[in-house]
Amino acid sequence: MGETTTRSDDADRATSRADDGSDPPSPPPAPGGLPLLGNVHELASDALAFYERRAATHGGVVRYDVFGTESYLVTDPAAIRRILVDDHDRYEKGSMPRDRLGGLLGDGLFLAEGDDWREQRTAIRSAFFRERVAEYGDPMVDHARRAAASWDDGDVVDVHAAATQYAFDVLAESLLGGDVERERETVRAAADSVTERFDTGRVTSFLPEWVPTPANRRYRRRLTALRSTIRDLVAERRAAGPPANPGAADDLLGTLVAAADMGAMDDDRLVDNAVTFLFAGHETSALGLTYTLYCLADRPAFQRRVRREVAALGGDPEPADLRECPALTAAVDEALRLYPPVHSFFREPTEPVTLGGHRVPGGVVLTLSPWTVHRDERWWEDPETYRPERWLREADAGETVHGDDAAGPAVGERPEYAYFPFGGGPRHCIGMRFARQELRLATATLLRRLWLEPVTADLSVRASANTRPAGPVRVRVRTRDESDRTTEPSDTN
Ligand code: HEM
């Protein structure tokens, strides 16, 4: 996370003043939409541009409406911090994510609220402790090695397709361990159907799950098969004797079984959580890797810097090596700034609240948008340019400063919540350490073998469930070592 600055403190103080009633808050600006439809047409045509326009024109808390649902876009970093951290117990995830994702994720961690959420998070968190995440390093490197080996010099590769396959393989193996080979097809088929069902590029994705379209029927059938496979695996593991405690399990499913056996969740929630990990963790990581590789292909000089860094490791990277790789870390952190895989997420205040000096009623939808905040030129110089150097500060002794577990502070002054690709506060992404390790290990393993050249010239993305590319993201891979080139590649931006 970035540094907290005077600007953020000022904004915080302004919010507190309003909260204690001495400076009466006003309603947020509410630039109009169409009767009944509200702002649906603008959201449907380009939600990301709509958010950017609203925030730039009307400030950090602004109203919009979706079919009569009162919604507020919150892009003021101080207000975001208040929602996610300081006053987090005055907010729920609310009905928006539940209506959309409830059929898939059930009552697992992602959608649970209150005490139920707290108990689940406590029971599960050991699976994401540093030492446990380090154990998932092998599949993260192995699958990247395999991908690199499948390409020949000069091949044009769709990195989005390749990264999706990669992140799926890593997550399926981390979740199911040795059982993955046997169950790969069931899991794969369910994953394909989920991607199809939540692809807002398809009109049918807006229909409720119960409408019997062929895609919906396929989706329900495959999800039922996945859930029953997970139940069978759980039964097998119990028969074999589960580990004594969640921290001793060697894959994510083992942690969940141990947590259930200790009474932290029932078997329905266990299955909900297995499905939750699979789907909260694989598309997001795939997108992070896609954008990192695309951006590095487009910035040859920085790609070269990362290549030198990872070539110096002497072998394929281990999780502990990542501390020695500031340029690699900066490359990933900057890709997650420019193209945050989760472009926005939602909260609902359980009571009336004051945000950014405005009075906001309880029960409305608050949209928190990393995409919009990460591109705000008040916090980021030249925000639309991929510039990993902004995460690297030459420290006094000449070493480069960067973050390890979470992104380090970028150079320059800005509020903490000017950067939040993984959310924040107690409900921040539980998979953050896993994902940051995976993105860096995959990028390092690939760049030790490959040189990437841009083919797709202008990346265009759209706000589907996540920030998806609008089409294939092509790069040309070179398997020959580019260091024998006489001319140093230069960046175009
Ligand atoms: C680059 C990759 C990823 C990004 C950008 C990302 C982003 C996010 C964000 C923004 C949230 C917060 C949502 C909210 O507060 O409403 C979240 C929550 C969550 N993420 Fe991730 N995520 C990533 C990878 C993963 C992985 C690899 C896993 C699992 C293995 C995972 C599992 C979860 C879960 C279970 C939650 C809900 C946590 C809770 O509510 O307690 N994510 N993620």
Image (cartoon, grey):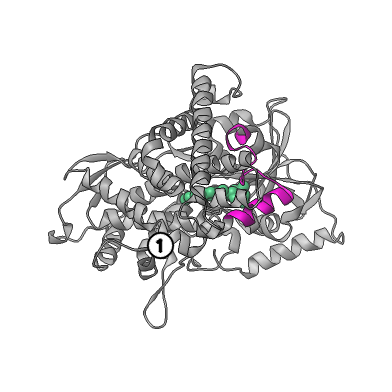
Regarding residue 386, the answer to whether it shows in the image is no
In this rendered view, identify the residue nearer to me: 435 or 343. Answer: 435
Q: Is residue 432 left or right of residue 350?
A: left
Secondary structure at badge 1 equals helix
Q: Is residue 86 above or below residue 254?
A: below
Q: Is residue 238 left or right of residue 108?
A: left
In this rendered view, identify the residue nearer to me: 93 or 384. Answer: 93
Q: Is residue 66 left or right of residue 317?
A: right
Q: Is residue 249 above or below residue 458?
A: below
Most common secondary structure along the magenta stretch: helix
- Residue 12, x across and y down, in percent: 71, 63
Give the quarter of the image for residue 136.
bottom left
Q: Quadrant of the N terminus?
A: bottom right
The residue at 59%/18% (across/down) is 211
At label 1, counting other C-alpha atoms closer than 10 Å, the crowd grade (few under 14, some 14-19, many 20 or more) is many
- Residue 434, x across and y down, in percent: 46, 56
In this rendered view, identify the residue nearer to me: 261 or 483. Answer: 261
- Residue 432, x across and y down, in percent: 51, 56
Amino acid type of the residue that numbered disc 1 sits on in the rendered structure = Ala
Residue 347 inside the magenta-drawn segment: no
- Residue sticking out furthest to the bottom: 397
The residue at 59%/32% (across/down) is 42
- Residue 209, x across and y down, in percent: 59, 24
Q: How many marks?
A: 1
Q: Is residue 35 above or below residue 415?
A: above
Q: Which residues are magenta?
A: 101-124
Q: Quadrant of the C terminus?
A: bottom left
Regarding residue 19, the answer to whether it shows in the image is yes
